Amino acid sequence: MFPSPCVNILPSYFFLADQVSQHLAFSPEFTAAVEAKQVAQQEAQRAAFVVDKARQEKQAMVVRAQGEARSAELIGDAIKKSRSYVDLREFENARNIASILEKSNNKVYLDSSGLGLNITQTASDKAAKAAK
C-alpha cells in the first residue's frame, strides 16, 4: 500500500487510497505516438549501424589498396634487380596449369611453350625479350 507519510497527507485532500484505480489506459493517439517514437529510434539506430559499417568497409578498402600498391612497388623493385622473380612466377604459373590439366579428364598435348615455360628459350633470349 502507501507509506505512512502518504496516508497522513491523503486524508487532507479527501483522497482515499482504496479508491485508486489499478488500470490506467492511454488514449489511442498517445499509444500510437509512443510506438511511432520507438520505431523511429530503431530506424535511427539501424541507419547509424549502416553508416558505421560503410565507414569500416571504406577503411578496409583503403588499407587493401595501400597494401596492393606497396606489393606492386616491391615486385617492381625485385624485377628491376633480377629477372629471377619473373622466372619464378612463370614456373609457378606453369605448375598451376599442369595441376589443372592433371585433374582434367581430357587429354591435352602441349608443345614446349604450352605451359609458358619456353624450355627451348635461352636466358639471353629471355633477357632480350624483357628489354623490349
Image: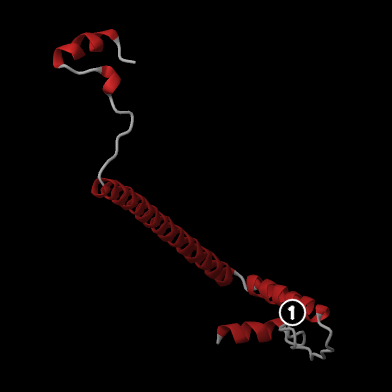
Front residue of 41/107: it is 41
Crowd band around label 1 with a 10 angstrom C-alpha radius: few (<14), some (14–19), many (20+): some
**Circle 1 sits in a helix, a strand or a loop, which is it?**
helix
Residue ID at (78%, 88%) = 112
Reply above or below: 91 against 124: above
Q: Is residue 105 left or right of residue 118?
A: right
Front residue of 52/83: it is 52
Q: Amino acid at mark 1?
A: Ile
Q: Quadrant of residue 8?
A: top left
Q: Is residue 110 left or right of residue 36?
A: right
| Location of residue 94 in the rendering, given as x and y in whole percent from the top left corner | 73, 78
| Location of residue 80 in the rendering, given as x and y in whole percent from the top left corner | 55, 71
| Location of residue 116 in the rendering, given as x and y in whole percent from the top left corner | 71, 84
Front residue of 30/75: it is 30
Reply above or below: 91 against 114: above
- For the N terminus, the image quarter is top left
Front residue of 110/33: it is 33
Residue ID at (25%, 11%) = 7
- For the C terminus, the image quarter is bottom right
In this figure, which residue is indicated by the disc labeled 1?
Answer: 97
Residue ID at (84%, 84%) = 105
Give the total number of marks visible in the rendering.
Answer: 1
